[in-house]
Amino acid sequence: MTQFMNKRENIVTEAIDGLLMASGGRLIRLDGYPHIRVVLRADWDKSRVALVSGGGSGHEPAHAGFVGPGMLTAAVCGDVFASPSVDAVLAGILAVTGPAGCLLIVKNYTGDRLNFGLAAERARAFGLKVSMVIVDDDIALPNLPQSRGLAGTLFVHKIAGHVAEQGQDLAAVTEAAERVIAGAKSIGMSLDTCTVPGSHKENRIAPGMAELGLGIHGEPGVEQVDFNSAAHAMAAMIEKLAAAEHDGPYVALLNNLGGASVLEMSVLTYELLRSPLGAKIKYIIGPAAMMTSLDMRGVSISLLPLTPQIETALTAPVPLSAWPGCHPNTAIKTKALPDGLTPIRPIPSHHKPTKDFLIKCCQIMISLESDLNALDAKSGDGDTGSTLAGAAHALIDAVDQLPLSDHTQLYRAIGLELSQTMGGSSGVLLAIFFAAAGDAASSGLTMRDALRAGLERMQEIGGAKPGDRTMIDALQPALEALEAGLPAAAKAARAGADHTATMLTAKAGRAAYVSAGNLGGHIDPGAEAVARLFEALCDELM
């Protein structure tokens, strides 16, 4: 079992009850488990038009997460990726529908259309006023006569919900929903398939590929396309949306399909809003997980042309935590750094041998990125190589602005650059190392002694010492042996780094939280970086 569940057959009912227990009494359910699973507004008095939606589970927070004032009145929940039964839908309709009537909001899937449709007919036989709209916002297959319903359904929930909350009649609520459905367009993309509870995961998306134009039930997309960056992925989705574009303005809904991190979703937001399409987007909803496909590592974009009525409905606040709000697309604003923190840049000076040496050191660090990441993954968070490579790229970019002919100022300038561009504790420690080396060099110490002074200051502030399984285990012996020449320093660094593989306890860094079984036999990545740098310089220069 690779999922947090008890029994597969109970996952939906237990999830619903968990939602209700955490709702503070705002939500209730019909008594009908396990076959009838309907979540209702606790405060509903049947005085206005009711909105009922639903479908298969696995799309949370849709649909039960959007039950509340200004959105849905009830959500009917089926099994995972399976339509609820006719009886369950009918129970939901009967529970919330009063003289004002009920609107069913249905995504365009055969099971949902049939079961909601038959339930509507049976409800009408009871004398109730029931309308039904079908959401078909998917544009992946523009020539398909039955386009699927995707996250654009949330536009319908919010806008029709707002109209109903204002007390308008069933005809007006239905008309508002139909106008939204006519304008909403959606496209999705994923880097991985989802994991259906209790089932074997299908790994059909190859590394380096992404699936474009997929639904929300784990079904294959329209095509697999090359994937190499967030910008490339966003461009592929925007290209599909372009065929359905007009002049705007739009509201965009950026939906996490379940498995993308918050960090990734923010990057995708950046790419969307800085694209040519972004200039036409006046409001954005999200990024957030709103209509998911279990744990699918993907995203969908939904666009809706903006009118004054739609703007009013979408920006009206609702007390639902699952609804992220509708916010203006605004330009980035910045504020100047506080006094004392604005970087003081040294006066650049040129010295070709120093420049070539510094660039060579940076290129070595960049070449080690994947090896060091793999090594760090065994005892840390797998980013040592990326952190060092990022700092190396920044130094290369800044090299012509450095005081290359004055080594005292150069050490200080490198320390300043690392403090601003290199993340994590390693960036701070190396910034201290070079700043202290610069201070020592200004007092007339040799390069070797200045670097040793920098190491002493780094140890003093960082608290690590030889034997603690850090970069110091390679750097200290290398600097001590440097007086005998670069080959001796490289040999000492390698011996120090290799020795860390025998250390079963780390006393500094993230590895301090890792068990001995995971440390044994693995060289500390920081120490390995030092050893590899000295070895590469030795091969290059000797």
Image (spheres, rainbow, N blue to C red):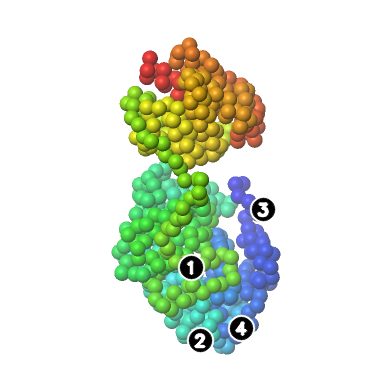
Kind of element beneath mark 4: loop
Q: Position of residue 118 (x, y in %)?
A: 51, 77
Residue 46, numbered circle: 4
Q: Which residue is mark 1?
A: 326
Residue type (three-letter) at the residue carrying disc 4? Lys
Which callout, 2 or 1, points at the residue further toward the start of the chain? 2
Which callout, 2 or 3, points at the residue further toward the start of the chain? 3
The residue located at (56%, 64%) in the rendering is 322
Q: Against 3, is 125 above or below?
A: below
Spatial CA distance of label 2 from label 3 is 44 Å
Q: Position of residue 499 (x, y in %)?
A: 58, 20
Q: Which residue is mark 3?
A: 6
Query: For the residues carrying marks 3 and 1, which lies nearer the camera in this image?
Result: 1
Spatial CA distance of label 3 from label 1 is 37 Å
Q: Against 538, is 124 above or below?
A: below
Q: Which residue is mark 2?
A: 169
